[in-house]
Amino acid sequence: MFMHKPLATSAVACLMAGCASSPDTVAQSSSARPAFGVPAPAEMLASWDISIAPDGAGLPPGRGSVQQGAAVYLQKCASCHGERGAGKPADPLVGGAGSLTSKTPMRTVGSYWPYATTLFDYTRRAMPLNNPMSMSNDEVYAVSAYLLFLNGIVGENEQLDAQSLMKIRMPNRDGFVSNWPRVR
């Protein structure tokens, strides 16, 4: 009955040792991320305030081509999303056109996402999964261009930037009810 007592005692001791650090010490030693109970610095919050609206408001400067995106994708995305966005182990990013009303809908960038700006926003904020927010704006524009190309939405010689990205009309643009003003 008491076989786990040494393990429990060790766990409590480790927990207490971790709590013994003062918030000031933790904040000084780890300025890259907030500590529990310590307010996040304003500059950190600003670096996370990167939302992009469907109409493109908030898109940063930068640009990237389909060819550049193929190289970035191979280096930073293919290990999870497969060759050319086919999926495995993570969800596929390519294909599924016309499948949303079928018994087996395939929700991909090309079949499901209503705005190209959402692709940029999500990729910039959450990818790669093991190092989110690590890609430069140019890399995110390039990967976006590559994925849009693979889905047949832009041409092979396309180069994306803030102005061109917000003009792309996604195939499922009208498939959602949105609280955002309609973008044309």
Image: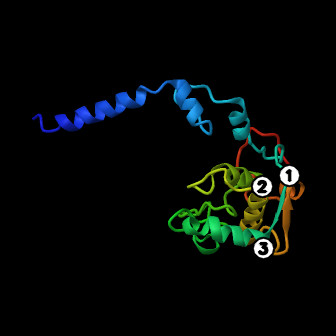
Tell me what residue is drawn at x 72 percent, y 40 percent.
Answer: 47
Q: CA distance from mark 3 to mark 2?
A: 16 Å
74 versus 12 height, above or below: below
Secondary structure of the residue carrying numbered label 1: loop
Q: Work out whether 66 lies above or below 27.
A: below
Q: Earlier in the sequence, mark 3 or mark 2?
A: 3
Q: Amino acid at mark 3?
A: Gln
Q: Position of residue 100 (x, y in %)?
A: 62, 60
Measure the C-alpha gap from mark 1 to mark 2: 7 Å
Q: Residue furthest left?
A: 1
Left or right: 22 as drawn, with respect to 148: left
Question: Could you say which is closer to the camera, residue 10 or residue 120?
Answer: 10
- Pointers 1 and 2 in contact (C-beta within 8 Å): yes
Q: Secondary structure at mark 2?
A: helix
The residue lying at 78 percent from left, 47 percent from top is 54
Q: Which residue is mark 3?
A: 67
Q: Position of residue 183 (x, y in %)?
A: 84, 47
Q: Position of residue 148 (x, y in %)?
A: 75, 66
Judged from this view, the residue extending furthest toward the right is 163
Q: Mark 1 is on which residue type?
A: Pro
Amino acid type, mark 2: Asn
Distance from Cα at disc 3 to Cα at disc 1:
19 Å
Report the residue at 82% width, 73% height from top: 155
Label placed on residue 61: 1
Residue 18 in sight in this render: yes
Number of callouts in the render?
A: 3
The residue beneath circle 2 is: 137
